[in-house]
Image: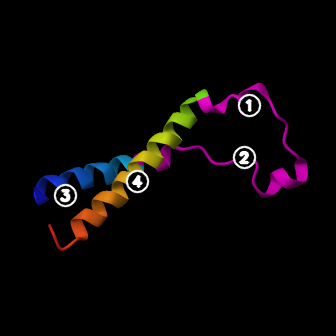
Amino acid sequence: MKIALTIVFIIIAIALAILVLSQEGKDNGFTGSFTGSVDTYWSKNKKHSKEARIQKATAILGALFIIIAAILSSKWM
């Protein structure tokens, strides 16, 4: 059981690293406060974009990563 959970943990870690590295940077950082940002059609409908799906998958895999890490470090395993 512990070996299978460790293998799943490693797969999730690799997938999480790939998803984090594939995300785009935030455009409206420090310079956005000076230049201002324009609400475009694309920025208003981002919840249906590829980037939104990547962010959702990252959040889910991150939660699974933490849960499995807690299970593997518990004294019951």
Whether tag 3 and tag 2 are in contact, CB under 8 A, the answer is no
Residue annotated with mark 2: 27
Q: Mark 2 or mark 3, which is nearer the start of the sequence?
A: 3
Q: CA distance from mark 1 to mark 3?
A: 40 Å
Give the residue pinned by disc 1: 44
Spatial CA span between label 3 and label 4? 16 Å
4 or 1: mark nearer the eye: 4
Q: Is residue 61 left or right of residue 22?
A: left
Write down the region rendered in magenta.
Answer: 18-47
- Characterize the local packing of mark 2: few (<14), some (14-19) or many (20 or more) Cα atoms within 10 angstroms: few
Viewer-nearest of discs 3 and 4: 4
Q: Which residue is mark 3?
A: 6
Secondary structure under tag 4 reads: helix
**Residue at numbered disc 4:** 63
Identify the secondary structure beneath mark 3: helix
Q: Give residue 66's mark.
A: none
Circle 1 Cα neighbour tier, 10 Å, few/some/many (<14 / 14–19 / ≥20): few
Q: CA distance from mark 2 to mark 1?
A: 15 Å
Q: Position of residue 48 (x, y in %)?
A: 59, 27
Assess whether mark 4 and mark 2 are in contact (beta carbons under 8 angstroms): no
Please state which amino acid type lies under the numbered disc 3: Thr
Task: Estimate the x, y position of residue 75 in percent, counting from the top left.
Answer: 18, 74
> Is 29 included in the stretch rendered in magenta?
yes
